[in-house]
Amino acid sequence: MRKILNKRDLILIGITLFSGLFLGWIFFHNSGSSKAVSHEHAEEAEAGIWTCSMHPQIKQDKPGLCPICAMDLVLLESESSDDENISPDEIQMSEASIKLAEIQTTIVQAGIPENKVYLLGKVKADERNIAQLTARIGGRIEKLFINYTGQQVKKGQKLATIYSPDLVNAQKELIEAYQYKESNPGFYKAIKSKLKLWDLTDKQIASIEDASEPILYFEILSPISGTVTLRHVAMGDYVKEGSALFEVTDLSKVWIMFDAYESDLAWIQLGDKIDFNLQSLPGNEYASEVTYIDPFIDAQSRTAQVRLEIANPKLIFKPEMFANGILESKLANNSNEILIPKTAMLWTGKRAVVYVKVPNRKSNFFIYREITLGAEAGNFYVVKKGLFAGEEIAVNGVFKIDAAAQLAGKPSMMNPAGGASSTGHDHGQMTKDEGKESPNVQDEPKANLEHEMFKVSGNCEMCKKTIEKAALALKGVNSAVWDVKKKVIHVSFNKDKVDLIEIHKAIAASGYDTELETAPIASYEKLAPCCKYTKD
């Protein structure tokens, strides 16, 4: 039997259906809104122009990979910043770009440069202990007492005998002159001197005089003790005057001759200790001091020879043995030098470039800086000019900063003069009627600009404005930025229009001491109380 619904039941069913539809609408409507908001935020996160640092012609509206080289695209951002006094040469990097490019920085420090120099060389005979025996007279080798090279001989030992008709005749003249030496001493002395020039000793001459007969076979004696290193004659050979006979070398002391490249010479000094080993004597370590540095560079190998001397009583060091040496050295002046890691530098073959992080900025700004390098110190370079201790430089991701600078038309490794800025911002020279632009930058041709930095005394921001204004007042000064903390001013100027000493004088005239000029007392007294620094 079908149950008939009453009016009350119908009302309850209607309320239930309406409540369910209302709650469902609220739930699904909010979910759709959340998705829309999330999608909107995602689009905002990817908003902007993404480009390739190697191929700037590639531009996309979202991140990804370069279709040419497959490198990660980087965000090309506009240079918006609340910082004041932004130089047009500065390149801004957002936190996202720094993380994407894996950029790392370090503080420049001064230290004593140390380096390990690895050297290759050979054992050589001491050239001062080599004796060359030549034939003083022509004749025939009658007998050899030395039959092979490498034979050990003593000083005065017989090496060979020679028969010379000329020597026989000279002895006959001596015997005759000896008989008349009282009446004709000049002739006697002349004949005796002639024999001495033929390497006859006083003892041999005396024997000829006593015997009253010429010696037919003349003995060739070794002038030093050592090793026969060359034998140029055989028994029965006829030799002419001046012909080479033997070479005898004393190997009781030898040289170790290392080849040092040009870049290593700055680290090598007389008296430096070199540890070395020989390939033919593995497991043994030796050491000696540098006694000589060749003043000439070999035109082919671009090396100079560095010499050690070492005793060799047991003759274990044999000429032409290979040697490997290590020299741990410091620079000659042994003083603190500015050192930077090799990874911080870009090298074009003509210019060494680093990117310096601009201090006292709310955002990350870097600026191109050319430096002058000194010696190579292991994983570091000595900087002779262009950086001060305490400055912060990029040491990783430097190439990506340079690529961003090229994209933005800033000074970069391949374009030191810079180009038209792609950001559209104008940071040029402030005119008399404009008060919004930075007052520390003028408009000079960048191709002629030279960068210098030097210390200037001062205390506060008021000092900063006065110092920079004094420098910029000179025609030819393009930019001047004084660091309040480091007391260092960075100046870019046209060297054809103004000298560096003029800039020093202009700043000193405003009341502030520089490295080269002292401010006049009258100018110093005119400074505000907060600006009166402590004069040296």
Image (tube, grey):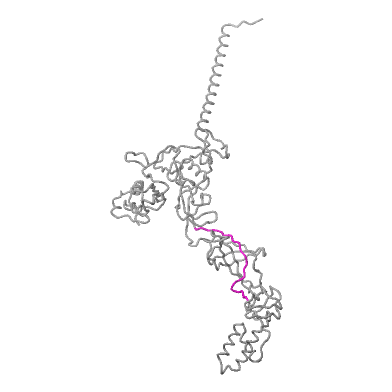
Image point 49% across, 37% down: which residue?
76
Left or right of 135 on screen, residue 405: left
Which of 40 and 354 lies nearest the eye of the viewer? 354
Can residue 321 be seen by looking at this rendering?
Answer: yes
Residue 193, compared with residue 252, is above or below; it is: below
Residue lying at the far bottom in this picture: please name it: 183
Q: Which residues are magenta?
A: 112-132
Q: Quadrant of residue 423?
A: top left
Which secondary structure type mostly characterizes the magenta part of the structure? strand
Q: Where, quadrant-wise, is the C terminus in this rendering?
A: bottom left
Which of 480 and 406 lies nearest the eye of the viewer? 406
Residue 149, compared with residue 417, is above or below; it is: below
Image point 53% across, 46% down: which residue?
396
Which of 350 and 489 lies nearest the eye of the viewer? 350
Q: How many marks?
A: 0
Q: Quadrant of residue 193?
A: bottom right
Q: Residue 236 at x, y = what percent?
A: 71, 78
Q: Is residue 516 magenta?
A: no
Image point 41% across, 42% down: which residue?
86
Q: Quadrant of residue 259?
A: bottom right
Q: Where, quadrant-wise, is the N terminus in this rendering?
A: top right
Which of 433 and 137 lies nearest the eye of the viewer? 137
Q: Is residue 117 magenta?
A: yes
Left or right of 226 on screen, residue 292: left
Q: Residue 109 at x, y = what percent?
A: 48, 53
Image point 58% across, 60% down: which residue?
118
Q: Residue 244 at x, y = what percent?
A: 64, 75
Q: Residue 322 at x, y = what percent?
A: 64, 64
Can residue 484 be seen by looking at this rendering?
Answer: no
